[in-house]
């Protein structure tokens, strides 16, 4: 309407959160974005037009967060009301506020995006939960009546935690098993601390524990406890085990000393920061003083680049096979990496790793590419340019090509089917949503959809909880 258009044109421009300067970020793993203060939160909240009962931002969010409704409460200074509302759909809003790619989801769809710039939804979400949790607000489960059902959850990542949250709110007794010593899955051990402070998950563990969720950490199902035991002891089991097989480049010498997979590199770095010992599979690698090349162009690649820069690497180069505009990760993270000193080599493809006399990597042979026809997803394919090979010197090469599901024979032994890529087959459409081919086992998150996002894993964990409640005839679940 003309009124709405006038309102949009009168809005102040979008306000970004403040961040540490590159100098302040150097050599440490502190979160780089500073929280909104009250004035910033009010300013941004006042830019929201409250587009309707179910606005476009809410629909674009995989969790269907009640965004305009909690923004309204911020405007009214009602942080308690806002945080209670945000917990109706999301059990980790302080996390999603920090790590969601909002530019591709809620903020990307915001009505005022093209006029004054989308409302800074993620930062308001973070503001609400940081403020409320610091003041001692906690979810209130005093009205929940226990039901005589118990469910085991394998994996304390976002999928498992979101599933546990819905179940415990319906009175089910829930135990979450994880092989790691802390909850969070990739939130704790994958995403670096400069994007997500690790104390947040420790606080959440206390909150979930107070809500009645039991955690059995340092416990790997299939090794320490057979899945069959859980199937005997519980009414149902949810599998949220993620995807942990690093994709390979398939080039000569990729297993040579000095070549590392992205995830073990990041996990070991976080364990070191948390004061935990390194493991045999994930040895700590300090790249201080080294010439580091990171292969890949997604968010994981950028996390590796920025981790090596914080170690004090002499030079860190990200080598990617397409151009900057076609990088798959967040533009914001590329910008942050550049500010911190990252170099980029675009339109190159790895051919082989070169080795010194001792057999250790000393460089990478690359071939230049140009962008050809678009593929099925509409992204232009890189085409090698003949005769363009060159060697880029490197003391360490980190491979960040993404992840595939890992093999889980213990799961298949219990009749759970997987697809050709190893993803668990779960029935998304049925009444018992996310039920697998073993009716007592449900699954969700990366293990079902392939490596994706925190917010999609959480949405699947919630839907699976809904499916389990229906299957166990607990009661009609309230999914908001
Ligand atoms: P996970 O988070 O992988 O959790 C699975 C859990 O299961 C783990 O804790 C694991 O220890 C446990 N487990 C596995 N097998 C067993 C077993 N047999 N017994 C017991 N426990 C087991 N997404 C975003 O939205 N924003 C980002 O900024 C972002 N950055 C990322 C950075 C990196 C480096 C990586 C690798 C991923 C990133 N992602 C990001 C993706 C996101 O982290 C994942 O999509 C999400 O964590 C998947 O959740 P999940 O619960 O399915 O699995
Ligand atoms: Fe507010 Fe943007 Fe959502 Fe509209 S789309 S309700 S302006 S945040």
Image (spheres, rainbow, N blue to C red):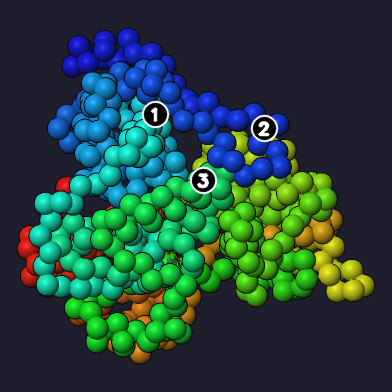
Mark before the other along the chain sequence, 3 or 2? 2
Decide: few, some or many residues near mark 1? Use Cα within 10 Å; few <14, some 14-19, many ≥20.
many
Left-right relation of 344 to 467: right
Quarter holding residue 418: bottom left
**Location of mark 3 (residue):** 197
**Location of mark 1 (residue):** 120
Residue shown at the point (41%, 45%) measured from the top left: 95
Say above or below: 78 vs 153. Answer: above
Return the x and y of residue 134 as percentages of the image width and height: 38, 37
Return the x and y of residue 127 as percentages of the image width and height: 38, 32
Residue at disc 2, secondary structure:
helix
Mark before the other along the chain sequence, 3 or 1? 1
**Location of mark 2 (residue):** 24
Q: CA distance from mark 2 to mark 1?
A: 24 Å
Say above or below: 467 vs 341. Answer: below
Report the number of numbered marks. 3
Q: Answer yes or no: is residue 315 visible.
A: yes
Return the x and y of residue 479 as percentages of the image width and height: 16, 52
Q: CA distance from mark 3 to mark 2?
A: 16 Å
Quarter holding residue 390: bottom right
Dots 3, 2 in contact, CB < 8 A: no
Residue at disc 3, secondary structure:
loop
Residue situated in front as seen by the camera: 110 or 409:
409
Dots 2, 1 in contact, CB < 8 A: no
């Amino acid at each position: 309407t003309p009124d709405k258009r006038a309102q949009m044109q009168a809005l102040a421009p979008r306000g970004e959160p403040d961040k540490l300067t590159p100098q302040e970020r150097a050599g440490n793993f502190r979160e780089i974005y500073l929280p909104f203060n009250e004035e910033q939160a009010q300013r941004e909240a006042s830019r929201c037009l409250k587009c309707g009962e179910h606005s476009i931002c809410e629909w674009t969010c995989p969790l269907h967060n009640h965004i305009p409704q909690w923004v309204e409460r911020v405007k009214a200074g009602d942080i308690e009301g806002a945080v209670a509302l945000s917990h109706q759909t999301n059990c980790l809003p302080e996390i999603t506020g920090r790590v969601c790619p909002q530019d591709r989801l809620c903020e990307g769809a915001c009505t005022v995006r093209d006029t004054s710039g989308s409302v800074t939804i993620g930062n308001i979400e973070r503001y609400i939960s940081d403020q409320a949790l610091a003041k001692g607000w906690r979810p209130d489960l005093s009205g929940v009546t226990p039901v005589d059902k118990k469910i085991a959850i394998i994996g304390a990542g976002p999928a498992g935690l979101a599933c546990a949250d819905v179940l415990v709110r319906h009175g089910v007794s829930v135990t979450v098993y994880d092989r790691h010593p802390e909850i969070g899955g990739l939130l704790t051990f994958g995403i670096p601390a400069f994007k997500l402070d690790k104390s947040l998950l420790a606080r959440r563990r206390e909150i979930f524990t107070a809500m009645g969720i039991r955690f059995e950490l340092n416990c790997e199902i299939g090794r320490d406890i057979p899945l069959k035991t859980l199937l005997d002891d519980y009414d149902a089991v949810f599998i949220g085990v993620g995807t942990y097989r690093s994709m390979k480049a398939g080039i000569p010498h990729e297993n040579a000393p000095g070549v590392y997979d992205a995830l073990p590199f990041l996990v070991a770095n976080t364990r070191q920061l948390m004061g935990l010992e390194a493991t045999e599979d994930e040895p700590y690698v300090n790249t201080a003083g080294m010439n580091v090349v990171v292969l890949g162009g997604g968010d994981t690649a950028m996390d590796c680049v920025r981790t090596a820069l914080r170690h004090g690497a002499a030079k860190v180069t990200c080598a990617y096979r397409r151009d900057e505009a076609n990088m798959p990760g967040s533009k914001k993270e590329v910008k942050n990496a550049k500010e911190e000193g990252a170099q980029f080599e675009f339109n190159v493809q790895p051919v082989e790793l070169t080795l010194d006399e001792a057999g250790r990597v000393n460089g990478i042979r690359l071939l230049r590419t140009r962008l050809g026809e678009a593929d099925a997803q509409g992204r232009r394919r890189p085409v090698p340019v003949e005769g363009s090979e060159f060697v880029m010197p490197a003391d360490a090469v980190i491979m960040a090509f993404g992840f595939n599901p890992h093999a889980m024979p213990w799961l298949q032994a219990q009749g759970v089917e997987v697809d050709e890529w190893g993803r668990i087959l779960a029935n998304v459409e049925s009444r018992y949503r996310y039920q697998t081919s073993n009716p007592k086992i449900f699954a969700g998150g990366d293990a079902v959809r392939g490596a994706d996002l925190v917010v999609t894993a959480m949405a699947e964990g919630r839907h699976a909880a809904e499916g389990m409640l229906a299957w166990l005839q607990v009661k009609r679940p309230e999914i908001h």
